[in-house]
Image (cartoon, rainbow, N blue to C red):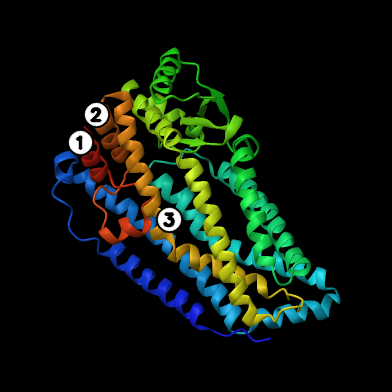
Amino acid sequence: MQLKLNPLWLLLIVSSALFCLLYLWFTLFPGRVIPEAWQYFSTEQITNGRDYNRTQQLLFISGFILKALFLGWFVFSGKAVAVSKYLERLTGSYRWSLLIFFILIWLLLKVINLPLTLYGSYFFQHRWGFSTQSLGFWWLDYFKGSVLDLILSMAGFIILFWSFARWPRTWWLACAVLISFWLLIQSFLWPVLISPLFNRFEPATDPAIINMVHNISQKAGLEIEQVLVMDASRRTTKANAYFTGLGHTKRIVLYDNLLNNYSLDEVEAVIAHEMAHWKQGHIVQGLLWGIVLTFMLWLVLFLLLKQAVPLNTRFPPFVWPLILLYFLLVSFVGSPAENYISRSMEKEADQVAVKLTENEAAAIRLQKNLSVKNTSDVSPPAFIRWFDYSHPPVIERINNIKQIK
């Protein structure tokens, strides 16, 4: 069995390479700052935002390039096939060769990405004054995250190869159904089983916050199950909030940094924004988009693997890095479409939130303060915004808020 570069692989590789070059170019040469930025931010704030995000973007693209180059070399040089056959001869067992091959690839990818992860999430964040973690605490987080990643990846790996054997002609459909089911289960269980492994969550007890939530939820026609405060300050000085869960596990989560460092009307703007996501059905929409995309991607993968492994043939271990490379490239190339949908939802949530609070000034002040305290790039290049931004840049959000009637 010889893996060859067919037209679809070439399209994925060429598209990824082109996006990489454009991403690097606009990261290193972002161009001029839009005039409106100077109305809201100082020269120091704008410069800091560009410097901080330039390094963040270089770390991201470097990680992608390293993983893509390793997997591409391993798959198309014939090394994956050679190692796969060697392990089958060495163990004399198809199942043991699969397991060893999986662990080998998992470890190699971890080692490749570790230096960038350590620098980007620990040393670099300390340099800018964002991280509050000790190095030991960082390693504990990394260990817990790695164990969780290993368990979930291995579960997916086992289900995938079981599907290959059980449904040799329709395994892609079985995988798409199982993953769609997992997306649903994850939405229910992640907030109550996984998130508490990394953070503590306590119900909001401040009467002002509780009354605020009650008033906004009545305006929005929603029943809020839980508003929780997360101990984010154990790791970072940054502020954030998010909506998560489905059914009885849905909740709004507020960083303790947000409550400690922002005014009450700014916190109200954040809560209203998260409720707006809920009111507009963005969580369910995102889930449905994910399910549709899952079926499409697994069908394309089926067509790709048909050329590498004939039907009714046992799938060898070397198929695994091929699948990892496929999803790595597809995820990268598909980022603009995913982020476009996300930005549209964020814009809608901003608009609905201001209508709920009837406080445009607080919403604008919140956006300015979040940008300054989180050292955002207030004037990103158009390509970086299009490719990489899940939220509209701050000036765009301020202008959108001002247009609300």
Measured Cα–Cα span from mark 3 to mark 2: 28 Å
Callout 2–callout 1 Cβ contact below 8 Å: yes
In the rendered image, residue 154, in percent from the top left (x then y), is placed at: 71, 58
**In this figure, which residue is indicated by the disc labeled 3?**
338
Identify the image quadrant of the C terminus.
top left
**As drawn, 363 above or below 338:** above
**In this figure, which residue is indicated by the disc labeled 1?**
402
**In this figure, which residue is indicated by the disc labeled 2?**
360
Element type at mark 3? helix
Badge 3 or badge 2: first in the primary sequence: 3
Residue appearing at x 31%, y 22% in the figure: 265
Measured Cα–Cα span from mark 3 to mark 1: 26 Å
State which quadrant residue 14 falls in. Answer: bottom left
Q: How crowded is mark 1: few (under 14 residues within 10 Å), some or many (20 or more)?
A: some
Q: What residue type is labelled 3?
A: Glu
Residue appearing at x 30%, y 35% in the figure: 351
